[in-house]
Image (cartoon, grey):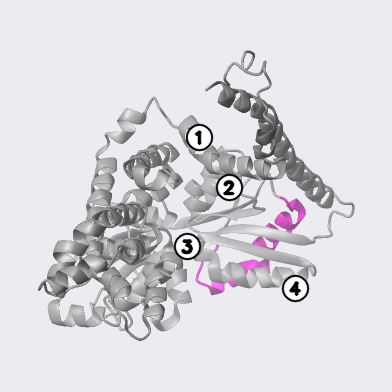
Amino acid sequence: MTPPASDTRKGGRRPGRIRTGVPFALLLPALLGLAFLLLPLVALLIRAPWHSLPEQLTSPEVWQALRLSLVCATSATALSLVIGVPLAWLLARTDFPGRGLVRALVTLPLVLPPVVGGVALLLALGRNGVVGQWLDAWFGITLPFTTTGVVLAETFVAMPFLVISVEGTLRAADPRYEEAATTLGASRFTAFRRVTLPLIAPGIAAGAVLAWARALGEFGATITFAGNFPGRTQTMPLAVYLALQSDPEAAIALSLVLLAVSIAVLAGLRDRWMTTS
Amino acid sequence: MTPRTARRARRTLPLTGTAVAALLVLSACSSSDDTSSGSSSSAPGAAKVSGTVTVFAAASLQETFTALGAEFEKAHPGTEVVFNFGGSDTLAASITSGAPADVFAAASSKTMAIVTDAKDNASAPVTFARNQLAIATLPGNPDQVTSLKDLTKSGLKVVLCDRTVPCGAAAQKALDASGLELTPVSYEQDVKSALTKVELREADAAVVYKTDVRAAGDKVEGVDFPESADAVNDYPIAPLKDAPNAEAAKAFVTLVRSAEGQKALTEAGFLTP
């Protein structure tokens, strides 16, 4: 890598330095792990159809899927913010019986396979679902096979990321600021709005980006709950999956777009997540 | 700057060493795998079938092939049939990308051609069954669907298979032949997902195979339509070139084509080739 000749001359090994070397038994698996994570991405770049790429990426189908993905992921994030931040506040700042259980339930979608989430959503909000049948009977609203269905599926999977992130930030934030605000006459809601929110804004932003990225990549719950129809419910991951069967080059091109978006997200988060102190 | 580069330089050597070692470990694993399976398949007494046979089969074959698999295990003690049911195009794509499979049974010649074009088949595919489309509606047919044309009624939620899947291609062919324009609510990735949407009552109707309607029992109601005669699918089967268990693959294909296999298929609603 770097020209070593002139640097090694002195053998700058001071006695204290020797033991800081990385042991082989750790280095080997560490490098294997690194290679394992990077190799597929490198392969994607190697096999990318660079020549036909401009053509692939400008096709209306790709833009349709990308636009739908961005719209749905953003809507899902907005919905997560509206109902997720108050939920995080409830978990962090109040004490009620069974709070531990509630927190565990909130994190359940994190570990639940998304397809299972999709099935559960069908059974709850489907046309024949526990709640869905009333939505259909009273308001004529059916959610499966609609863009709203995609947003709900993505919210279900992505919101826990936001809640966990915001709750963690709230716990780290000093509650005495809020207490000071309330002793000075502010209502608890005003204190939340004027003191807490600005205080935890970075945590909310990070959680929102994380949720947005998760929503963008959502596949299982979406295809199970919302089906697959171009322009309405076919998001990028669904398009990639189905393109892989008929047109692998298109699938690779679509994957590159998602990879680029993911890298952009990471770059945006780098201050928060990439720096370890 | 200088001491740091020096340290980095010292690390470079073991670093490449480990990378090489890692590759060796991995390749050693895969090559030992190859030899073991190779020796078992080229064992003397070729008629003796044993071990696991992996069958990739179209989703519409699920019920019939599962039953035939049990027959196979009974007829050849010591064998185990492992199935991977899915959309034929998905299966074909995974076979051409190297998925370890012994037999491929597709729901259309077109999807089988993906495999034969890649020269991944051991011998020429043979058609072992044919299948006709039917409309699956909710039990009791509340929307009174009696023809393909009825599916284009507004307000009716219809699901089709994706056009890349044989059932979707056949449905499109039938619709085109009769000059009908149908906008479904979803293009599903295989025929069973399309059927499931009706079983769960999320969709009002789906265009699936007759065999699927029959397999679903009273969870859906089948409606035959004459246009389906123009869009009958051939089901080809072939043992695969890189089959880990080539003998068992041949034996399974033989079973499917035998009188017993054909009987099971006809009972499920398949047409004879």
Is residue B140 or residue B81 the one in the foreground?
B81
Q: Position of residue A168 (x, y in %)?
A: 36, 63
Classify residue A76 as left or right of residue B129: left
Q: Position of residue B172 (x, y in %)?
A: 32, 54
Specify start and end residues of the magenta stretch as a single range. Answer: B244-273
Residue in view at x 79 percent, y 45 percent: B32
Provide the chain ID for the residue under circle 4. B
Label 3 SS: strand
Q: Is residue B166 above or below residue A136?
A: above
C-alpha span from label 2 to label 1: 23 Å
Q: Determine which residue is flagged by label 2.
A: B95
The amino acid pointed to by label 4 is Lys
Verify whether residue B267 appears in magenta. yes
Q: Determine which residue is flagged by label 3.
A: B131
Label 4 SS: helix
The amino acid pointed to by label 1 is Val
C-alpha span from label 3 to label 4: 27 Å
Picture disc at residue A148: none
Q: Are marks 3 and 4 on the same chain?
A: yes
Task: Tell us which disc is closer to us: 2 or 4.
Answer: 2
Q: Determine which residue is flagged by label 4.
A: B74
First reached walking from the N terminus: tag 3 or tag 4: 4
Residue in view at x 27 percent, y 54 percent: A73
Label 1 SS: helix
The amino acid pointed to by label 3 is Asn
C-alpha span from label 3 to label 1: 43 Å
